[in-house]
Image (cartoon, grey):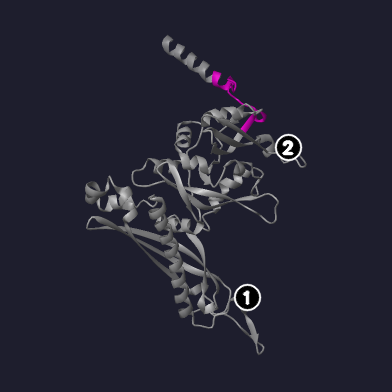
């Protein structure tokens, strides 16, 4: 009993102590600077340049009007390594810099073309950094993108991060984070592809704005080139990363005026076959489409108009996809579409015997056929667009459903 009483007293002391212990590692909010975005460049003298956009929590979250204090501070410094440059940024900061809230990593072109290995190494080994952080590559230096006052948020880095959420609507960009890039970087059958940021002029604002469009293609750890936004959408079709998209084509039945189609229910099937000692890839893309806008009156039947639009959209998807794959094979020799993985899975015996150790050479010569099948939902078609309704002889002539 005496032993039980002693144990009981010890437990009571421990429980009471937990209610009275202080927050020994507490950090005051006005002493913190939260890194929201970081840009990394490589200089000619082989030094790294790190630029950070740091949020000041008390200013960024304040609702006080007329405050002259900026919600963010931008600091930049050089160093022999990425970590060295980051430590040198800390020399200029009057606040304790925290990295756990970082939204995006922007890589300059010089750094990416030389090697992304130092970036992968630093961010994969640092326990304070999240691997789900967005990552992008730019033409030129990364620093201007971190310094830019872009978007509609008080903290520009939040605007950059939210581009990834809404950029899927046009489907002309890649949603790349550190975890995905790290996975492809380590993969034996797929090369990395990274989203691209561009600086564009906004007529309504003096400051340039940042857009998410296009992509950077890597071979192993080096950037080898860029895909256009349309080519990037073609790659997204192959990778089945498109939920919906908007495509615009010129219709001969509308005097070459534009027709806009929204496609959804997009599905992609990839089939690999071996003929002789060479693989052949067939990419089949299917989707449902709805006409959302047309710029001219159509006097032809709905079925004729529908058939032409389906053919135009199919040709657009097929052309963009073929252009992207051709560039991957002939210019970059980079399998970001994971054709090697499909050959491995679907033809394992031939992969093990023939292709496993020479896929780089085989990928360039692999025959690829792209098929596209789009079904326009005729229930959304009108004979005459609303903006072109006419009054003829006192009677209104309206478009009709099928």
Q: Who's the residue at 23% across and 51% down the image?
A: 350
Q: Secondary structure at mark 1?
A: helix
Q: Which residue is mark 1?
A: 387
Q: CA distance from mark 2 to mark 1?
A: 49 Å
Q: Residues within 10 Å of mark 1 (few under 14, many from 20)?
A: few
Q: Is residue 141 left or right of residue 222?
A: right
Q: Is residue 221 left or right of residue 147?
A: left
Question: In x, y percent, where is residue 22?
Answer: 60, 21
Q: Tell whether position 32 is magenta.
A: yes
User: Mark 2 or mark 1: which comes first in sequence?
Assistant: 2
Q: Who's the residue at 47% across and 55% down the image?
A: 232
Nearer the observer, 361 or 106: 361
Q: What is the magenta range?
A: 17-33
Nearer the observer, 209 or 35: 209
Placement of 175 over or under 119, stated as above or below:
below
Q: Quadrant of residue 35?
A: top right
Q: Which residue is mark 2?
A: 69
């Amino acid at each position: 009993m005496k032993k039980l009483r002693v144990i009981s007293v010890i437990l009571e002391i421990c429980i009471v102590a937990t209610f009275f212990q202080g927050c020994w590692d507490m950090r005051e909010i006005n002493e913190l600077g939260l890194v929201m975005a970081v840009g990394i460049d490589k200089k000619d003298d082989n030094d790294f340049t790190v630029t950070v956009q740091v949020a000041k929590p008390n200013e960024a979250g304040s609702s006080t009007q007329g405050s002259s204090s900026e919600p963010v501070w931008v600091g930049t410094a050089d160093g022999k390594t990425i970590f060295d440059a980051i430590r040198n940024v800390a020399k200029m900061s009057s606040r304790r810099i925290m990295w756990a809230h970082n939204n995006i990593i922007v890589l300059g072109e010089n750094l990416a073309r030389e090697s992304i290995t130092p970036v992968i190494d630093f961010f994969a080994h640092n326990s304070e950094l999240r691997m789900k952080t967005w990552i992008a590559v730019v033409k030129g230096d990364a620093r201007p993108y971190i310094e830019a006052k872009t978007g509609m948020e008080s903290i520009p880095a939040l605007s950059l991060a939210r581009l990834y959420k809404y950029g899927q609507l046009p489907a002309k960009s890649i949603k790349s984070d550190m975890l995905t890039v790290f996975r492809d970087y380590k993969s034996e059958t797929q090369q990395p592809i990274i989203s691209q940021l561009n600086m564009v002029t906004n007529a309504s604002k003096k400051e340039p704005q940042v857009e998410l469009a296009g992509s950077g293609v890597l071979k192993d750890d080096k950037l080898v080139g860029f895909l256009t936004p349309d080519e990037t959408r073609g790659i997204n079709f192959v990778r089945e990363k498109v939920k919906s998209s908007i495509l615009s084509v010129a219709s001969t039945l509308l005097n070459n005026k534009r027709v806009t189609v929204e496609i959804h229910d997009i599905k992609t099937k990839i089939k690999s076959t071996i003929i002789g000692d060479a693989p052949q890839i067939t990419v089949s893309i299917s989707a449902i489409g709805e006409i959302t806008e047309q710029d001219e009156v159509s006097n032809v039947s709905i079925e004729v108009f529908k058939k032409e639009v389906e053919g135009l959209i199919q040709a657009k998807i097929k052309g963009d996809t073929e252009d992207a794959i051709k560039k991957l094979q002939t210019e970059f020799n980079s399998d970001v579409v994971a054709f090697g993985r499909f050959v491995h899975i679907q033809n394992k015996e031939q992969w093990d015997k023939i292709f496993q150790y020479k896929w780089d050479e085989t990928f360039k010569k692999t025959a690829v056929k792209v098929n596209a099948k789009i079904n326009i939902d005729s229930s959304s078609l009108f004979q005459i667009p609303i903006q072109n309704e006419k009054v003829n002889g006192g009677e209104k002539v309206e478009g009709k459903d099928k």
